[in-house]
Image (cartoon, helix red, strand yellow):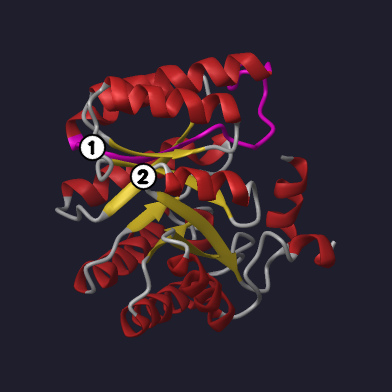
């Protein structure tokens, strides 16, 4: 499993991740760094994750890396206490703001969706604008969520979603998820959102290009996003065609659960 995971993970240390981001920069690709930390059981573990993100932002600043960060709220204590998690996230977002950087809140399984969106809104209403969210096309609620978030002027990563969910929560058929992805992307662009179009699906990549052109978006008003180690040649082609591309670069010792999801995908 560790051998298989090496394709998708920069390594166990921040220095490994920085080396990968430097390499992406030479390919005119941006990055988002993710600290692998999902199985948090106490407050001290969550606070340690916060400290790691502080180190990440300082290293990005020092090395002039073209990267922001992604965070999972369960790694910041979401399952322990809502307010504790929000304050941990706020610390990270403020640290990013001081360094002119940006934080993306990853979306996890559907049991966390409402709480994640609530914390995102709380931070935005507190005046923290350098933070974005993720929406999953597989979830039946996503179009409604786009409508609810429209007043914030959101920055969204739109992905299919890889978590196994019950039929009343998520679309089960491949084509249904695809169709909802296109509908969600169209709704986000119509609402004026900045969208990270996160997919490796060739049909969705083609539809993404079509929709950003249809909505008259300049190339700095959206981006495509891909996972480290997945469809690298296609990513190169997107860059050659003039599109912005950001690569999701996870690192850390907690690689096992992330690797299972990548293999499932």
- Binning the other alpha carbons within 10 Å of mark 2 as few (below 14), some (14 to 19) or many (20 upward) gives few
Numbered range of the magenta stretch: 152-173
Residue placed at 45% from the left, 20% from the top?
A: 182
Left or right of 203, for residue 118: left
Helix, strand or loop at disc 2? loop
Which quarter shows the C terminus?
top right
Residue that mark 2 sits on: 242
Residue 180, image x and y in percent?
50, 18
| Label annotation for residue 218 | 1
Specify the quadrant that holds the N terminus. Answer: bottom right
Relative vertical location of residue 180 with respect to residue 150 in this rendering, above or below: above
Q: Is residue 208 left or right of residue 109?
A: left
- Residue 122, disc: none
Residue 167 visible? The answer is: no
Residue at position x 26%, y 38% from top? 154
Q: Residues within 10 Å of mark 1 (few under 14, many from 20)?
A: few
The residue shown at (32%, 48%) is 132
- Who's the residue at 29% across and 53% down the image? 131
Spatial separation of the CA atoms under disc 1 and disc 2: 10 Å
Q: Is residue 211 left or right of residue 137?
A: left
Give residue 223's quadrant in the image. Answer: top left
How far from the left and from the top, in percent, is residue 200? 59, 38
Q: Secondary structure at mark 1?
A: loop
Q: Nearer the viewer, residue 31 or 125?
A: 31
């Amino acid at each position: 499993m560790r051998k298989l995971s090496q394709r998708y993970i920069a390594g166990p240390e921040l220095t490994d991740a920085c080396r990968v981001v430097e390499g992406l920069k030479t390919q005119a690709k941006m990055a988002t760094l993710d600290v692998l930390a999902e199985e948090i059981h106490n407050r001290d573990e969550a606070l340690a994750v916060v400290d790691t993100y502080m180190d990440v932002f300082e290293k990005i600043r020092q090395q002039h890396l073209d990267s922001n960060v992604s965070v999972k709220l369960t790694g910041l204590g979401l399952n322990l206490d809502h307010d504790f998690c929000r304050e941990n996230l706020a610390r990270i977002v403020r640290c990013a703001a001081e360094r002119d950087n940006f934080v993306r809140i990853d979306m996890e399984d559907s049991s966390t969706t409402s709480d994640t969106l609530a914390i995102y809104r709380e931070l935005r209403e507190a005046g923290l604008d350098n933070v974005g969210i993720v929406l999953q096309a597989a979830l039946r609620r996503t179009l409604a969520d786009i409508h609810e978030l429209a007043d914030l002027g959101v920055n969204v990563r739109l992905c299919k979603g890889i978590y196994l969910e019950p039929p009343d929560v998520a679309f089960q058929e491949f084509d249904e998820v695809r169709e909802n992805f296109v509908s969600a992307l169209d709704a986000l662009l119509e609402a004026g959102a900045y969208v990270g179009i996160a997919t490796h699906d060739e049909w969705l990549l083609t539809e993404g290009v079509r929709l950003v052109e249809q909505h008259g978006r300049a190339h700095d008003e959206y981006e495509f996003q891909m996972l480290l180690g997945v469809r690298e040649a296609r990513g190169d082609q997107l860059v050659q065609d003039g599109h912005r591309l950001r690569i999701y670069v996870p690192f850390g010792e907690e690689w096992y659960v992330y690797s299972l999801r990548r293999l499932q995908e």
